[in-house]
Image (cartoon, rainbow, N blue to C red):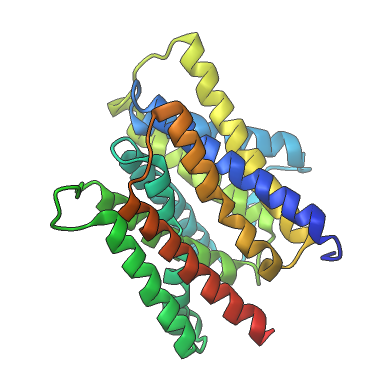
Amino acid sequence: MNTDHPQKGILFICAAVFLFASSDALSKYLTNFYPVVMVLWVRYVVHVSLMLVVLRPPSFKTLIVTQNRKLQIIRGLCMVNTNLMFISALHFIPLAEGTAIIYLSPLLVTSMSGPLLGERIARLQWIAVAIGFIGVLFIVRPGGSMFHPVALLALGAALSFSVYQIITRKLNHTDRSSTTNFISGLISALVTSVLLPFFWKTPTLYFALLMVLLGISALVSHLWMTKAYQHAKPSTLAPFSYTQLLFAGLIGYVFFNQIPDFIGLVGMLVIVAGGLLVFSKVSYKK
Protein backbone atom coordinates (compact mmCIF):
# COMPACT_ATOMS: atom_id res chain seq x y z
CA MET A 1 0.00 0.00 0.00
CA ASN A 2 1.47 3.34 -1.04
CA THR A 3 0.73 6.03 1.55
CA ASP A 4 3.23 8.59 0.27
CA HIS A 5 0.70 10.92 -1.39
CA PRO A 6 -1.42 12.38 1.44
CA GLN A 7 -2.77 15.21 -0.75
CA LYS A 8 -4.30 12.68 -3.14
CA GLY A 9 -5.70 10.73 -0.21
CA ILE A 10 -7.30 13.84 1.24
CA LEU A 11 -8.88 14.73 -2.11
CA PHE A 12 -10.25 11.21 -2.51
CA ILE A 13 -11.72 11.06 0.98
CA CYS A 14 -13.34 14.50 0.66
CA ALA A 15 -14.84 13.46 -2.68
CA ALA A 16 -15.98 10.15 -1.18
CA VAL A 17 -17.74 11.69 1.83
CA PHE A 18 -19.34 14.29 -0.44
CA LEU A 19 -20.84 11.42 -2.44
CA PHE A 20 -21.87 9.71 0.81
CA ALA A 21 -23.75 12.85 1.86
CA SER A 22 -25.25 13.23 -1.62
CA SER A 23 -26.35 9.58 -1.66
CA ASP A 24 -28.00 9.97 1.75
CA ALA A 25 -29.77 13.12 0.55
CA LEU A 26 -30.97 11.37 -2.61
CA SER A 27 -32.21 8.44 -0.53
CA LYS A 28 -34.05 10.85 1.76
CA TYR A 29 -35.69 12.49 -1.26
CA LEU A 30 -36.66 9.19 -2.90
CA THR A 31 -38.31 7.83 0.26
CA ASN A 32 -40.84 10.65 -0.01
CA PHE A 33 -42.25 8.76 -3.00
CA TYR A 34 -41.14 5.12 -2.70
CA PRO A 35 -40.58 2.61 0.13
CA VAL A 36 -37.11 2.40 1.67
CA VAL A 37 -36.82 -1.30 0.77
CA MET A 38 -37.42 -0.58 -2.90
CA VAL A 39 -34.90 2.28 -3.01
CA LEU A 40 -32.25 0.10 -1.38
CA TRP A 41 -33.04 -2.87 -3.63
CA VAL A 42 -32.25 -0.84 -6.76
CA ARG A 43 -29.13 0.53 -5.08
CA TYR A 44 -27.79 -2.93 -4.25
CA VAL A 45 -28.65 -4.47 -7.61
CA VAL A 46 -26.79 -1.64 -9.34
CA HIS A 47 -23.93 -2.03 -6.84
CA VAL A 48 -23.50 -5.76 -7.54
CA SER A 49 -23.91 -5.37 -11.30
CA LEU A 50 -21.34 -2.58 -11.53
CA MET A 51 -18.85 -4.50 -9.38
CA LEU A 52 -19.03 -7.35 -11.88
CA VAL A 53 -18.34 -4.87 -14.68
CA VAL A 54 -15.54 -3.02 -12.86
CA LEU A 55 -13.76 -6.07 -11.45
CA ARG A 56 -14.33 -8.35 -14.48
CA PRO A 57 -13.50 -11.55 -12.56
CA PRO A 58 -12.56 -14.67 -14.58
CA SER A 59 -15.51 -16.41 -12.92
CA PHE A 60 -18.29 -15.57 -10.47
CA LYS A 61 -16.82 -18.08 -8.03
CA THR A 62 -13.63 -16.05 -7.58
CA LEU A 63 -15.68 -13.22 -6.05
CA ILE A 64 -17.50 -15.35 -3.49
CA VAL A 65 -14.71 -17.65 -2.27
CA THR A 66 -14.15 -16.75 1.38
CA GLN A 67 -12.22 -18.10 4.34
CA ASN A 68 -14.96 -17.08 6.76
CA ARG A 69 -18.46 -17.54 5.39
CA LYS A 70 -20.25 -16.87 8.69
CA LEU A 71 -18.60 -13.47 9.22
CA GLN A 72 -19.25 -12.51 5.59
CA ILE A 73 -22.95 -13.27 6.00
CA ILE A 74 -23.16 -11.32 9.27
CA ARG A 75 -21.35 -8.37 7.67
CA GLY A 76 -23.80 -8.36 4.74
CA LEU A 77 -26.76 -8.45 7.13
CA CYS A 78 -25.25 -5.59 9.14
CA MET A 79 -24.84 -3.60 5.92
CA VAL A 80 -28.47 -3.91 4.84
CA ASN A 81 -29.72 -3.44 8.42
CA THR A 82 -27.67 -0.26 8.83
CA ASN A 83 -29.05 1.26 5.66
CA LEU A 84 -32.64 0.20 6.32
CA MET A 85 -32.60 1.87 9.73
CA PHE A 86 -30.59 4.93 8.71
CA ILE A 87 -32.58 5.78 5.56
CA SER A 88 -35.83 5.16 7.45
CA ALA A 89 -34.65 7.62 10.11
CA LEU A 90 -33.62 10.21 7.51
CA HIS A 91 -37.18 10.24 6.21
CA PHE A 92 -38.16 11.98 9.46
CA ILE A 93 -35.06 13.71 10.87
CA PRO A 94 -32.72 16.30 9.30
CA LEU A 95 -29.84 15.05 7.18
CA ALA A 96 -27.10 16.74 9.24
CA GLU A 97 -28.34 15.40 12.58
CA GLY A 98 -28.75 11.88 11.19
CA THR A 99 -25.23 11.98 9.75
CA ALA A 100 -23.83 13.19 13.08
CA ILE A 101 -25.44 10.28 14.94
CA ILE A 102 -23.92 7.80 12.46
CA TYR A 103 -20.53 9.34 13.25
CA LEU A 104 -20.91 7.90 16.73
CA SER A 105 -19.83 4.58 15.16
CA PRO A 106 -16.02 5.13 15.46
CA LEU A 107 -16.56 5.64 19.19
CA LEU A 108 -18.71 2.51 19.42
CA VAL A 109 -16.03 0.58 17.54
CA THR A 110 -13.53 1.74 20.15
CA SER A 111 -15.73 0.59 23.03
CA MET A 112 -16.37 -2.81 21.40
CA SER A 113 -12.79 -3.46 20.29
CA GLY A 114 -11.86 -4.66 23.78
CA PRO A 115 -14.33 -7.54 24.19
CA LEU A 116 -14.59 -8.42 20.48
CA LEU A 117 -11.02 -7.91 19.22
CA GLY A 118 -9.05 -8.23 22.44
CA GLU A 119 -7.62 -4.72 22.11
CA ARG A 120 -6.64 -2.66 25.14
CA ILE A 121 -8.72 0.52 25.42
CA ALA A 122 -6.90 3.46 27.01
CA ARG A 123 -8.58 5.78 29.52
CA LEU A 124 -8.46 8.68 27.05
CA GLN A 125 -10.37 6.60 24.51
CA TRP A 126 -13.11 5.84 27.06
CA ILE A 127 -13.33 9.58 27.74
CA ALA A 128 -13.73 10.14 23.99
CA VAL A 129 -16.57 7.59 23.89
CA ALA A 130 -18.32 9.37 26.78
CA ILE A 131 -17.91 12.72 25.00
CA GLY A 132 -19.49 11.26 21.85
CA PHE A 133 -22.51 9.97 23.76
CA ILE A 134 -22.98 13.39 25.36
CA GLY A 135 -23.03 14.85 21.85
CA VAL A 136 -25.74 12.38 20.82
CA LEU A 137 -27.83 13.43 23.84
CA PHE A 138 -27.62 17.03 22.64
CA ILE A 139 -28.96 15.97 19.23
CA VAL A 140 -31.57 13.39 20.27
CA ARG A 141 -32.71 15.19 23.46
CA PRO A 142 -34.74 12.31 24.97
CA GLY A 143 -37.69 13.56 26.99
CA GLY A 144 -37.60 17.00 25.39
CA SER A 145 -40.20 18.58 23.14
CA MET A 146 -37.81 18.30 20.16
CA PHE A 147 -37.29 14.55 20.66
CA HIS A 148 -38.28 12.36 17.71
CA PRO A 149 -38.47 8.62 18.52
CA VAL A 150 -37.26 7.79 15.01
CA ALA A 151 -33.86 9.21 16.01
CA LEU A 152 -33.42 5.93 17.88
CA LEU A 153 -33.33 4.23 14.48
CA ALA A 154 -30.28 6.31 13.62
CA LEU A 155 -28.68 5.20 16.88
CA GLY A 156 -29.47 1.59 15.98
CA ALA A 157 -27.90 2.19 12.57
CA ALA A 158 -24.73 3.54 14.24
CA LEU A 159 -24.53 0.42 16.41
CA SER A 160 -25.09 -1.89 13.44
CA PHE A 161 -22.48 0.00 11.41
CA SER A 162 -20.00 -0.40 14.26
CA VAL A 163 -20.41 -4.18 14.22
CA TYR A 164 -20.02 -4.01 10.42
CA GLN A 165 -16.70 -2.15 10.81
CA ILE A 166 -15.34 -4.56 13.42
CA ILE A 167 -16.19 -7.56 11.24
CA THR A 168 -14.52 -5.81 8.31
CA ARG A 169 -11.32 -5.51 10.35
CA LYS A 170 -11.39 -9.23 11.12
CA LEU A 171 -12.09 -10.18 7.49
CA ASN A 172 -9.20 -8.03 6.25
CA HIS A 173 -6.87 -10.71 7.64
CA THR A 174 -8.42 -13.53 5.60
CA ASP A 175 -10.29 -12.22 2.53
CA ARG A 176 -9.72 -9.72 -0.27
CA SER A 177 -11.59 -6.42 0.04
CA SER A 178 -13.21 -6.98 -3.37
CA THR A 179 -14.62 -10.30 -2.16
CA THR A 180 -15.88 -8.77 1.08
CA ASN A 181 -17.56 -5.82 -0.65
CA PHE A 182 -19.13 -7.99 -3.34
CA ILE A 183 -20.54 -10.55 -0.89
CA SER A 184 -22.01 -7.81 1.32
CA GLY A 185 -23.65 -6.18 -1.69
CA LEU A 186 -24.96 -9.54 -2.89
CA ILE A 187 -26.43 -10.43 0.51
CA SER A 188 -28.04 -6.99 0.77
CA ALA A 189 -29.53 -7.41 -2.72
CA LEU A 190 -30.90 -10.85 -1.79
CA VAL A 191 -32.42 -9.64 1.49
CA THR A 192 -34.15 -6.67 -0.14
CA SER A 193 -35.29 -8.95 -3.01
CA VAL A 194 -37.11 -11.14 -0.49
CA LEU A 195 -38.81 -8.07 1.02
CA LEU A 196 -39.46 -6.33 -2.31
CA PRO A 197 -42.82 -7.99 -3.23
CA PHE A 198 -44.35 -6.49 -0.08
CA PHE A 199 -43.19 -2.97 -0.94
CA TRP A 200 -43.11 -2.80 -4.74
CA LYS A 201 -44.39 0.35 -6.39
CA THR A 202 -43.75 0.79 -10.12
CA PRO A 203 -41.46 3.81 -10.53
CA THR A 204 -41.67 6.42 -13.25
CA LEU A 205 -38.69 6.70 -15.60
CA TYR A 206 -37.47 9.80 -13.75
CA PHE A 207 -37.42 8.09 -10.35
CA ALA A 208 -36.01 4.87 -11.79
CA LEU A 209 -33.07 6.83 -13.18
CA LEU A 210 -32.55 8.54 -9.82
CA MET A 211 -32.45 5.15 -8.10
CA VAL A 212 -29.86 3.90 -10.60
CA LEU A 213 -27.87 7.09 -10.02
CA LEU A 214 -28.01 6.35 -6.29
CA GLY A 215 -26.50 2.91 -6.87
CA ILE A 216 -23.72 4.34 -9.03
CA SER A 217 -22.98 7.10 -6.51
CA ALA A 218 -22.84 4.65 -3.61
CA LEU A 219 -20.38 2.35 -5.40
CA VAL A 220 -18.13 5.18 -6.63
CA SER A 221 -17.97 6.65 -3.12
CA HIS A 222 -16.74 3.33 -1.73
CA LEU A 223 -14.16 3.02 -4.51
CA TRP A 224 -12.90 6.54 -3.80
CA MET A 225 -12.72 5.77 -0.09
CA THR A 226 -10.54 2.74 -0.87
CA LYS A 227 -8.34 4.94 -3.08
CA ALA A 228 -7.96 7.45 -0.25
CA TYR A 229 -6.54 4.81 2.09
CA GLN A 230 -4.16 3.66 -0.63
CA HIS A 231 -2.59 7.13 -0.74
CA ALA A 232 -2.63 8.24 2.90
CA LYS A 233 -2.65 6.88 6.44
CA PRO A 234 -5.93 6.59 8.39
CA SER A 235 -4.65 9.06 10.99
CA THR A 236 -4.10 11.62 8.22
CA LEU A 237 -7.51 11.08 6.66
CA ALA A 238 -9.64 10.84 9.81
CA PRO A 239 -10.14 14.60 10.38
CA PHE A 240 -11.15 15.10 6.74
CA SER A 241 -13.79 12.36 6.91
CA TYR A 242 -15.77 14.70 9.16
CA THR A 243 -16.28 17.08 6.25
CA GLN A 244 -19.27 14.84 5.51
CA LEU A 245 -21.05 16.69 8.33
CA LEU A 246 -20.38 19.97 6.55
CA PHE A 247 -21.61 18.59 3.23
CA ALA A 248 -24.70 17.09 4.89
CA GLY A 249 -25.47 20.43 6.52
CA LEU A 250 -25.12 22.36 3.25
CA ILE A 251 -27.14 19.83 1.24
CA GLY A 252 -29.81 19.71 3.94
CA TYR A 253 -30.10 23.49 3.87
CA VAL A 254 -30.14 23.86 0.06
CA PHE A 255 -32.47 20.99 -0.82
CA PHE A 256 -34.57 20.40 2.32
CA ASN A 257 -34.46 23.84 3.98
CA GLN A 258 -33.18 22.18 7.16
CA ILE A 259 -30.88 24.10 9.50
CA PRO A 260 -29.60 22.51 12.74
CA ASP A 261 -30.57 24.52 15.81
CA PHE A 262 -27.91 25.71 18.24
CA ILE A 263 -28.18 22.74 20.61
CA GLY A 264 -28.07 20.29 17.69
CA LEU A 265 -25.01 22.05 16.27
CA VAL A 266 -23.28 21.83 19.66
CA GLY A 267 -24.05 18.10 19.74
CA MET A 268 -22.54 17.62 16.28
CA LEU A 269 -19.35 19.43 17.31
CA VAL A 270 -19.10 17.37 20.50
CA ILE A 271 -19.36 14.12 18.51
CA VAL A 272 -16.64 15.35 16.15
CA ALA A 273 -14.45 16.23 19.15
CA GLY A 274 -14.89 12.75 20.59
CA GLY A 275 -14.09 11.10 17.27
CA LEU A 276 -10.98 13.19 16.70
CA LEU A 277 -9.82 12.41 20.24
CA VAL A 278 -9.97 8.69 19.46
CA PHE A 279 -8.05 9.12 16.21
CA SER A 280 -5.44 11.37 17.84
CA LYS A 281 -4.83 8.71 20.50
CA VAL A 282 -4.40 6.01 17.84
CA SER A 283 -2.08 8.28 15.83
CA TYR A 284 0.00 9.07 18.94
CA LYS A 285 0.41 5.36 19.76
CA LYS A 286 1.66 4.68 16.24
In the image: residue 167, left or right of residue 178: left
Which residue is at a point 32% across and 69% down the rendered structure image?
134
Q: Position of residue 57 (x, y in %)?
A: 76, 43
Quadrant containing the C terminus in the rendered view: bottom right
Q: So how many labels did they put on this image?
A: 0
Which residue is at a point 48% across and 52% down the rendered structure image?
76
What is the quadrant of residue 112 in the picture? bottom left
Q: Is residue 242 above or below residue 88?
A: below
Quadrant containing the N terminus in the rendered view: bottom right
Q: Residue most toward the front? A: 262
Q: Position of residue 9 (x, y in %)?
A: 76, 56
Q: Is residue 109 above or below residue 216?
A: below
Q: Is residue 261 above or below residue 45?
A: below
User: Could you tell me if residue 101 is visible in this image?
Assistant: no
Which residue is at a point 18% across and 58% down the rendered structure image?
142
Q: Is residue 29 above or below residue 54?
A: above
Which residue is at a point 28% across and 37% down the rendered structure image?
92
Q: Nearer the viewer, residue 54 or 147?
A: 147
In the image: residue 131, left or right of residue 239: left
